[in-house]
């Protein structure tokens, strides 16, 4: 029987930390026996929420973030 506790430790491939006011975002790219995943954790005054993004969705996430940044630039008038 296999579960999350018996698969062994995750190998951290890359980590980043983003601070924005009272929020802290931790981005950890990890690998384990089930594959690779981007773990995004938001910490607000000690309360944490986490999402896991499988590596096969990272290109789509990257593209979506780019479109959001473009929309933000257009809305704020920052057309560099």
Image: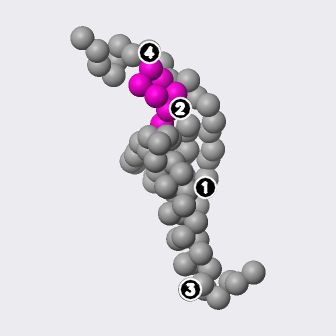
Q: Report the disc number at residue 19.
A: 1
Q: Secondary structure at mark 2?
A: strand
| Eye-nearest disc, 1 or 2 | 2
Measure the alpha-carbon separation of dots 3 and 4: 46 Å
According to the image, label 4 marks what residue?
8
Label whose residue precedes the other's in the sequence (2 or 3):
2
Label whose residue precedes the other's in the sequence (1 or 2):
1
Label whose residue precedes the other's in the sequence (1 or 3):
1
Measure the alpha-carbon separation of dots 1 and 3: 24 Å
| Eye-nearest disc, 1 or 4 | 4
Crowding near the residue tagged with mark 3, few <14, some 14–19, many ≥20 C-alpha atoms within 10 Å:
few
Measure the alpha-carbon separation of dots 1 and 2: 21 Å
Q: Quadrant of the C terminus?
A: bottom right
Would residue 21 be seen by someone viewing this image from the given angle?
no
Crowding near the residue tagged with mark 1, few <14, some 14–19, many ≥20 C-alpha atoms within 10 Å:
few
According to the image, label 3 marks what residue?
75
Q: Are marks 3 and 4 in contact (CB under 8 Å)?
A: no
Q: Quadrant of the N terminus?
A: top left
Q: Are marks 2 and 3 in contact (CB under 8 Å)?
A: no
In front of the other: 23 or 9? 9
Q: Which residues are magenta?
A: 31-37
What residue lies at 57% left-to-right and 78% top-to-bottom? 72
Q: Secondary structure at mark 1?
A: strand
Q: Report the disc number at residue 30.
A: 2
Instruction: Determine whether 26 is above or below 35 in the image.
Output: below
């Amino acid at each position: 029987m296999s579960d999350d506790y018996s698969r062994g430790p995750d190998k951290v491939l890359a980590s980043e930390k983003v601070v924005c006011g009272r929020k802290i975002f931790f981005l950890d790219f990890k690998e384990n026996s089930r594959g690779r995943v981007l773990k995004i954790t938001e910490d607000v005054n000690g309360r944490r929420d986490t999402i896991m993004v499988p590596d096969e969705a990272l290109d789509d996430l990257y593209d979506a973030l780019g479109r959001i940044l473009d929309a933000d630039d257009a809305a704020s008038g920052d057309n560099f």
